[in-house]
Amino acid sequence: MKSYRVEAAEPFKRQLADAQEWWIANRDKNPRALDQDVSRLLKRVENTPWAGQGVAGYPSVVRTMLLRKTHHRVAYRIDDEDGVVTLLVIWGSAERRPPEF
């Protein structure tokens, strides 16, 4: 089985930092749930990036996955030739629209 290298785009890094800050400040019962969800996502996209859902209006190499505990969604791009998955954006599923990517 092919293993992919995972990289994070700058928008993803900024959005994740903001989400982590909010989660820690507002979720006292499990302040690290977002970190745990993201860790699980990293393992999954390293091994099975095509398991994500396609995104309407984007090439098939752009996929999303739902983070089950925190209900955030992550969009990412797969470069099969180079074996790289780039995390593009993260957003809360309560938001009506994903951020631009």
Image (tube, rainbow, N blue to C red):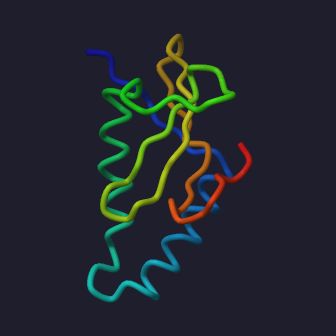
In this rendered view, identify the residue nearer to me: 82 or 19: 19
**Figure quadrant of residue 47:** top left
* Residue depicted at x 53% and y 16%: 82
Residue that appears at 45% across and 32% down: 53
**Quadrant of residue 2 within the rendered picture:** top left
Residue 11 located left or right of residue 4: right
Q: Measured from the top left, where is residue 75 in percent x and y? A: 55, 42
Q: Looking at the figure, which quarter contains the N terminus?
A: top left
**Across the whole image, how many numbered discs are drawn on residues?**
0
Q: Name the spot of residue 22 as percent of width and height, x first.
A: 52, 80
Residue 54's place in the image compared with 38, above or below, is: above
Q: Nearer the viewer, residue 17 or 73?
A: 73
Q: Quadrant of the C terminus?
A: top right
Q: Residue at x 33, y 89 (%)?
A: 28
Left/right of residue 92 with respect to residue 50 in the rendered view: right
Image location (x, y in percent) of residue 36 = 30, 61
Q: Residue furthest top?
A: 81
